[in-house]
Image (cartoon, helix red, strand yellow):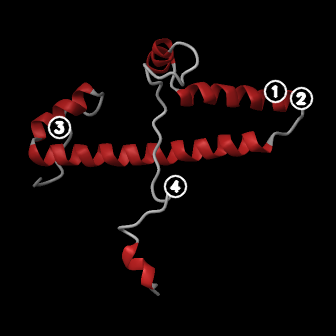
Amino acid sequence: MLSPFDIWAPIIRAPFSGDVTQEIAPRVLSPDIKGVPEIEDRVQTEVASYGRQLGKLLEAVKLLSEATATPVPEIDELIAGVEAVKKESKAELRANAEAALARLRAVDEGEWRAVLATRGGLADPAPDGPQG
């Protein structure tokens, strides 16, 4: 059931309501950054993202937890959550790739065959009937 305030929902937003995104990137000229922002940026882009760095720390804490028989359920929950998101993302990426290949085949079967050949796919797959 709609309330009288529902008509204003798309127009009025309270602070901290709605979708929130956060870019985690050092701001080169910001005084808020501890350390050297140029180095932080290079580490993140050339060595490992923040997620990969945190993942390594989570793995290390989990190994220490297991080695010392000290349960850390919060870490286990974080790791399980990250793995669930990765699994879901991989499935979405695969579905998107398959859809893109189907679109390419529909418009240009020759290029579709070339993509498959360069990616280790079938060099000459049998046509599946009319494409359109």
The residues tagged by marks 1 and 2 sit, at their Cα atoms, a distance apart of 6 Å
The residue pinned by badge 2 equals: 68
The amino acid sitting under disc 2 is: Thr
- Amino acid at dot 4: Phe
Q: Splitting the image into 4 quarters, where does residue 32 fall?
A: top right
Residue at left offset 40%, top offset 71%: 9
User: In this figure, which residue is indicated by the disc labeled 1?
Assistant: 64
Q: CA distance from mark 4 to mark 1?
A: 37 Å
Q: Nearer the viewer, residue 73 or 12?
A: 12
Tell me which label, 3 or 1, sits earlier in the chain: 1
The numbered dot on residue 16 is 4
Q: Which mark is residue 112?
A: 3
Label 4 element class: loop
Mark number, residue 86: none
Foreground tag (2 vs 3): 2
Q: Earlier in the sequence, mark 4 or mark 2?
A: 4
Q: Secondary structure at mark 3?
A: helix
- Mark 4 or mark 1: name the one nearer the start of the chain: 4
Query: Mark 3 against mark 1, which lies toward the viewer?
Result: 1
Spatial CA distance of label 3 from label 1 is: 49 Å
**Closer to us: 18 or 79:** 18
The quadrant in which residue 113 appears is: top left
Disc 2 crowd, CA 10 A, few/some/many (<14, 14-19, 20+):
few
Q: Secondary structure at mark 1?
A: helix
Say what amino acid the circle numbered 3 marks.
Trp
108 shown above or below 25 = below
